[in-house]
C-alpha cells in the first residue's frame, strides 16, 4: 500500500510560530470581492500552526476557485453539504477550535442573527453558534449597508456572542480588515502575549520511573496534566517551549519540542544538555523522584522470596542546577505537600524559593482534597514580594492563571 504524503502546502505550517499548533480553524468565505484576501489569511493561520478547513459560498466560488483554497490549506474545500454531514463534522461540539467568517457579508451576518441556514456557510454557522464554538467575523460591505439599521441591529444582537474584527472605513466602504489584523486578533484570542512572544522556555513535566529490577519500578501518580496544559498556554502566548517529559498520561501539546525521558537521572541529564543553549524562562513542573534505588538489579527478582530489601538514596534536585547554569533565567518551581496548613505551605514554598534561587514558586497540597478529583487544584503562588492564593478550580483555568502570573513577573 502506497503511503499518502502530506499536501505540499503544509510545508509552511509553524514557519512563523506555533501559537495555533493543534488548533482546528474553519474559514468561511462569503461572496464579497474581498474573498481573494481569504487565501492570505489561510496561509497566515497555517504559518502559525493552525489546521485550516475552508467553506465557500456559491457567490465566493465565482470570485475565487475552490482549488485556490485547497492549494492554500492542503484540505478539501466544502462548497455544498452532502450525506457526509460536513456541518456537523466541522462545527458540532468541540469539533473545531474557532470559526472565522472572512470576508463576511451583510447577508451572512443577517442569517446568523436570525437563525437562517439555507447555505453551507449559514448552516455551519448555525451549528457552531449552538455548540458555542468561538466565531469571528470580518465584515465587508458598502458604508451605507454597514450603517443600515437592520445590519446594526443584527450586529448588536451578536456583539456579546461572537467577535467582530473592525472593518476599514475607506472610500465610502466598510472594507474587510487586512489578513494580518485578523491574525493578530486570533492570536490574542488564544492567549497571545507581547511579553511572552518569542521567549524560549525550558519545562519539565510528568513523573519519573526508577527501576528496582528489570520489570519492577518506583514511580508516582503524576499525570503530567498541569505541565502539559501550562506548556500549551505558553505556546498559544507565542513562546517557544522545550518540554522534558517523563512518562505522563497527559498528551503533550503540539508546537513544543518534546524530549522524552523516564528516570530522574535521564531528566537531569536532558535539562543540563538543554541548558547549553540560552533560555529566558525555566519552569519545573515535573514530579521527579526524590529517591532512587541504590542498587537496581538488571534481572528480575524471583517472586518466591518472602522479603526483599530495597535501599533508596536521595536524588539530585533538578531545580537547584538551573541558576548555576544560567543566572539570568526566570525560574519557576513547583512545591507539592500533603495535608498541611496553608500557613505552613507558604512557609515551605518560601524556603524552596530561597534554596533554589527561584523567582516564583507554585505550591499546592496534594492531600485529601486533591485526591477527590485530580482535575481540580488549589494553589498558592509565592515570590519574594507577594503571596497569591488561587481557590480550587479546574487545571485548565489554573494553567491560564499561572501563565498570566509568569507574564506579569517577567
Image: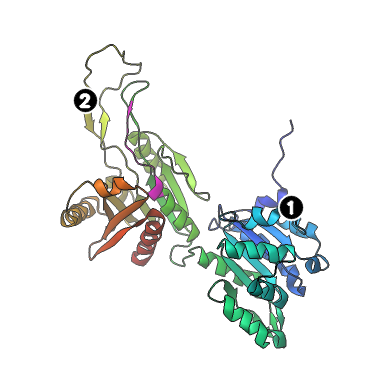
Give the residue furthest to the top.
304
> In the image, is 250 to the left or to the right of 406?
right
Q: Nearer the viewer, residue 287 or 338?
A: 338
Residue placed under numbered mark 2 in the picture: 311
Q: Nearer the viewer, residue 391 or 401?
A: 391
Camera sees residue 147: no
Q: For the point 72% across and 57% down, which residue is it?
A: 72
Query: Badge 1: few (under 14), some or many (20 or more) residues near its Cα, within 10 Å?
Result: some
Residue 169 lies in the magenta-colored region: no
* Displayed quadrant of residue 15: bottom right
In this rendering, is residue 312 above or below 135?
A: above
Camera sees residue 150: yes
Q: Nearer the viewer, residue 277 or 154?
A: 154
In this rendering, is residue 270 above or below 107?
A: above
Tag shown at residue 244: none
> In the image, is 302 to the left or to the right of 242?
left
Locate the N terminus and report the quarter of the image it occupies: top right
Which residues fall within the magenta stretch?
Answer: 217-227
Residue 230 x %, y % = 41, 54
Give the residue furthest to the right.
62
What is the basis of the colouring in this image?
rainbow
Residue placed under numbered mark 1 in the picture: 76
Amino acid at each position: 500500500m502506497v503511503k499518502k504524503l502530506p499536501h505540499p502546502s503544509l510545508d509552511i505550517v509553524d514557519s512563523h510560530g506555533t501559537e495555533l499548533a493543534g488548533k482546528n480553524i474553519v474559514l468561511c468565505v462569503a461572496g464579497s470581492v474581498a474573498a481573494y484576501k481569504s487565501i492570505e489569511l489561510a496561509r497566515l493561520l497555517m504559518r502559525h500552526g493552525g489546521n485550516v478547513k475552508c467553506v465557500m459560498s456559491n457567490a465566493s466560488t465565482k470570485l475565487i476557485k475552490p482549488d485556490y483554497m485547497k492549494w492554500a490549506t492542503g484540505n478539501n474545500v466544502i462548497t455544498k453539504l452532502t450525506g457526509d454531514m460536513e456541518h456537523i463534522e466541522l462545527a458540532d461540539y468541540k469539533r473545531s477550535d474557532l470559526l472565522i467568517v472572512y470576508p463576511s457579508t451583510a447577508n451572512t451576518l443577517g442569517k446568523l442573527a436570525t437563525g437562517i441556514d439555507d447555505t453551507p456557510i449559514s448552516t455551519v454557522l448555525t451549528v457552531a453558534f449552538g455548540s458555542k464554538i468561538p466565531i469571528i467575523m470580518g465584515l465587508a460591505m458598502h458604508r451605507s449597508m454597514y450603517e443600515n439599521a437592520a445590519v446594526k441591529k443584527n450586529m448588536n444582537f451578536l456583539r456579546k456572542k461572537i467577535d467582530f474584527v473592525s472593518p476599514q472605513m475607506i472610500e465610502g466602504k466598510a472594507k474587510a480588515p487586512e489578513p494580518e489584523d485578523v491574525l493578530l486578533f486570533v492570536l490574542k484570542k488564544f492567549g497571545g502575549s507581547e511579553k511572552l512572544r518569542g521567549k524560549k522556555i525550558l519545562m519539565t513535566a510528568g513523573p519519573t520511573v526508577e527501576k528496582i529490577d528489570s520489570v519492577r519500578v518506583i514511580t508516582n501518580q503524576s499525570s503530567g496534566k498541569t505541565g502539559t496544559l501550562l506548556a500549551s498556554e505558553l505556546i498559544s502566548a507565542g513562546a517557544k517551549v522545550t518540554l522534558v517529559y517523563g512518562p505522563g498520561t497527559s498528551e503533550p501539546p503540539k508546537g513544543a519540542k518534546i524530549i522524552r525521558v523516564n528516570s530522574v537521572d535521564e531528566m537531569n541529564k536532558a535539562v543540563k544538555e538543554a541548558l547549553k543553549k540560552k533560555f529566558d524562562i525555566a519552569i519545573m513542573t515535573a514530579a521527579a523522584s526524590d529517591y532512587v534505588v541504590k542498587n537496581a538489579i538488571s534481572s528480575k527478582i524471583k517472586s518466591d522470596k518472602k522479603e526483599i530489601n530495597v535501599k533508596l538514596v536521595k536524588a539530585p534536585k533538578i531545580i537547584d542546577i538551573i541558576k548555576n547554569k544560567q543566572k539570568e533565567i526566570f525560574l519557576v518551581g513547583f512545591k507539592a505537600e500533603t495535608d498541611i496548613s496553608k500557613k505552613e505551605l507558604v512557609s515551605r514554598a518560601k524556603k524552596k524559593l530561597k534554596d533554589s534561587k527561584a523567582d516564583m514558586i507554585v505550591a499546592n497540597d496534594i492531600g485529601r482534597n486533591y485526591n477527590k478529583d485530580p482535575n481540580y487544584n488549589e494553589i498558592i503562588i509565592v515570590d519574594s514580594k507577594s503571596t497569591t492564593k488561587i481557590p480550587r478550580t479546574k487545571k485548565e483555568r489554573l494553567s491560564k492563571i499561572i501563565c498570566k502570573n509568569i507574564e506579569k513577573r517577567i
